Image (cartoon, rainbow, N blue to C red):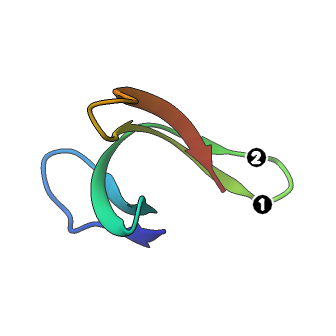
Amino acid sequence: MRCGLAGDQPALYVYDGGTWKYAPVMARLDHAGGRTEYQITLQTSRDRGTVHRAYW
């Protein structure tokens, strides 16, 4: 996972299916233990559609 450029909406680039894909960040969760979790929406192939995932 790589962080995207600053803009109107925070986003990440996620490696999926052999390519880097743009994924808007829907929520950021800061846990008490110091871990940060990002919830994203990822447009995958047409077969799989849109999925929602969390990365930390």
Q: Which mark is residue 31?
A: 2
Tell which of 11 and 32 is nearer to you: 11
- Distance between the alpha carbons at the discs numbered 1 and 2: 6 Å
* Kind of residue at disc 2: His
With 25 as the anchor, is 54 left or right in this view?
right
Mark 2 residue element? loop
In the image, residue 1 lies at what x, y percent?
48, 68
Q: Which mark is residue 34?
A: 1
Mark 1 residue element? loop
Tell which of 49 and 9 is nearer to you: 49
The reply to whether dot 1 and dot 2 touch (C-beta < 8 Å) is yes
What residue do we see at 40% from left, 30% from top?
48
What is the residue that sits farthest to the right in this orientation?
33
In the image, residue 31 lies at what x, y percent?
76, 46
* Kind of residue at disc 1: Gly
In the rendered view of the protein, which quadrant contains the C terminus? bottom right
Q: Quadrant of residue 24?
A: top left
Q: Which mark is residue 51?
A: none
